[in-house]
């Protein structure tokens, strides 16, 4: 028997490849499915099942394309009702995979259809639980997402279901079972997830706050709901794509990989409502970019920030990328439901500049330079775009906290005629923030290279720790 975790860092997402005696089950596949079919081909195996733990919110699953290309059966747990052919497994039902078996365990709470899959090896021993978003390493799934789809499912009701699922269906399993969750640290599907991507159930019972043995249901509900922030706006839209179906990623890639000369790119930008998305690194972008384009670098948490910053998944997009990155960018956009890339700039910014087209830039200074500026003028305004929790932990004294997550509120409160120095943790989010506001007429925002990390290393600015923040946003 073979178990392989296929982890995608930018989404903090784990898909799983399980094989026994030439039969394969794929759990929670990403939208691009070649990685799974190629593995099966190399193993001379047949993909029998596509097992979905729930209707995902943070990415578009590859269940439809994978089933179409392989003939595999799409399986959901009880209460799921997607708008395509699937197999509705019963709670406690056992699926056969070669000489192994997979038991279906319905665990409502994160969503009502949430289901875990318990793997038993060829000898019948229970060896692994694929827990989806029900149980993470160090956390449990947030119970407030399904209410975005069904209003009657309050977060309190879902949290109560989650408590019972964990206590009576998961915590009763053997301590030596390996937990394989759908996500790790960095995912918005939980709040305290570990960087570890697997663990024993016994260790989770001992260390996971949500599995404390003496915790009452009321205490559990309070603990799980405490500190939740609003999920990205694209989450409900991805849920509906996973329920209703979607266009094949092959068609999405074909449409997006349309190379445009600088003249054709400029015409497309002027004649459509397309957003120009520049995915180069922050400091390269700052030196020269197409006016009104926004920067979300491909080498950071790209897909989640696209989802947070671009509210309409049907938004037409024109791409500026590093050469050779076009297909990767289009694929990563499609992972979170952004299917309407209509072309990319052939030859990148070099071609744009050589064609004599208009270029904009963003001023970027070092941590040492901002320290000197602040020393000369203590009233210098610094904006910290990290999350409120990061800011509360420690921040530059007198800095204003304007989290990138709430950029539309920030925009209404910043004086267009005033100069601000903007930083995040390392320089990725600050460039997103500045580029979006610059496209909307804010021309006096200056980036601090290396962000708070560089500021601390420089050691010249006063740092405030564990205090009530000065907030720009309520």
Image: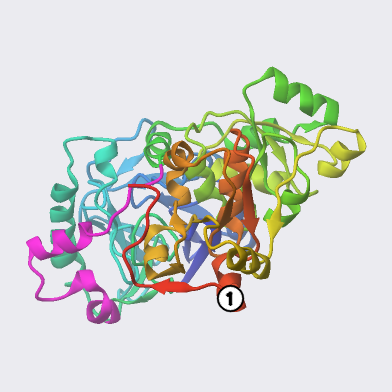
How packed is label 1: few (under 14 Cα within 10 Å), some, or many (20 or more)?
some
Q: Which residue is drawn at 39% across and 45% down?
A: 57
- Identify which residue, 15 or 332, lies in the foreground: 332
Q: Which residue is drawn at 48% across and 64% down?
A: 19
Asked if residue 208 is among those painted magenta in the image, a careful observer would answer: yes
The residue identified by callout 1 is 460
- Identify which residue, 407 or 383, lies in the foreground: 383
Q: Where is residue 138 in the image (x, y as percent from the top left)?
A: 32, 71
The vertical placement of 464 against 112, above or below, is below
Q: In this view, does 205 lie to the left or right of 67?
A: left
Tell me where residue 258 sits by quadrant: top right
Q: Which residue is drawn at 60% across and 55% down?
A: 35
Q: Is residue 84 left or right of residue 162?
A: right
- Identify which residue, 173 or 213, lies in the foreground: 213
Q: Is residue 224 left or right of residue 428?
A: left
The vertical placement of 118 against 404, above or below, is below
Q: Where is residue 164 in the image (x, y as percent from the top left)?
A: 13, 60
Residue 243 visible within the image: yes
- Identify which residue, 179 or 214, lies in the foreground: 214
- Magenta region, residue range: 203-232
Q: What number of labels is visible?
A: 1
């Amino acid at each position: 028997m073979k178990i392989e975790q296929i982890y995608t860092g930018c989404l903090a997402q784990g898909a799983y490849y399980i094989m026994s005696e030439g039969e394969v089950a794929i759990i929670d596949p990403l939208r691009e499915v070649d990685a799974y079919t190629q593995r099966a081909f190399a193993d001379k195996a047949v993909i029998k099942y596509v097992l979905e733990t729930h209707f995902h919110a943070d990415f578009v699953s590859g269940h439809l394309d994978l089933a179409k290309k392989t003939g595999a059966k799409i399986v959901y747990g009880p209460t799921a009702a997607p708008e395509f052919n699937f197999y509705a497994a019963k709670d406690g039902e056992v699926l056969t995979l070669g000489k192994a078996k997979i038991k279906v365990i319905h665990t409502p709470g994160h969503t009502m259809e949430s289901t875990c899959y318990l793997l038993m090896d060829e000898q019948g021993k229970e060896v692994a639980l694929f827990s989806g978003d029900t149980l993470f390493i160090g956390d449990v799934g947030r119970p407030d997402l399904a209410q975005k789809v069904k209003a009657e499912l309050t977060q309190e009701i879902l949290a109560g279901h989650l408590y019972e699922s964990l206590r009576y269906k998961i915590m009763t399993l053997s301590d030596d079972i390996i937990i394989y969750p759908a996500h790790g640290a960095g995912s918005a599907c939980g709040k305290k997830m570990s960087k570890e991507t697997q663990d024993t159930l016994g260790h989770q019972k001992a260390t996971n706050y949500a599995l404390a043995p003496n915790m009452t249901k009321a205490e559990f509900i309070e603990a799980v709901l405490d500190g939740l922030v609003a999920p990205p706006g694209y989450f409900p839209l991805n849920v509906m794509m996973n329920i209703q179906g979607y266009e094949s990623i092959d068609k999405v890639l074909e449409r997006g990989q349309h190379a445009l000369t600088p003249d054709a790119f400029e015409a497309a930008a002027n004649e459509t409502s397309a957003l120009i998305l520049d995915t180069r690194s922050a400091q390269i972008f700052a030196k020269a970019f197409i006016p009104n384009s926004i920067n979300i670098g491909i080498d950071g948490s790209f897909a989640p920030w696209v989802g947070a910053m671009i509210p309409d998944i049907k938004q037409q997009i024109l791409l500026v990328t590093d050469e050779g990155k076009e297909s990767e960018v289009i694929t990563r956009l499609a992972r979170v439901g952004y299917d309407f890339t209509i072309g990319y700039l052939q030859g990148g910014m070099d071609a744009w500049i050589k064609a004599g087209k208009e270029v904009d830039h963003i001023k970027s200074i070092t941590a040492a330079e901002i320290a000197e500026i602040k020393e000369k003028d203590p009233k210098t305004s610094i904006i910290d775009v990290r999350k409120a929790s990061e800011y509360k932990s420690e921040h530059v004294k007198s800095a204003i906290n304007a989290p990138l997550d709430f950029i539309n509120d920030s925009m209404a409160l910043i004086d267009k005629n005033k100069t601000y120095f903007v930083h995040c943790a390392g320089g990725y989010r600050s460039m997103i923030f500045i580029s979006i506001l610059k496209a909307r007429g804010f021309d006096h925002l200056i980036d601090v290279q290396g962000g708070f990390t560089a500021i601390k290393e420089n050691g010249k600015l006063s740092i405030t720790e564990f205090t009530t923040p000065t907030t720009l946003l309520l």
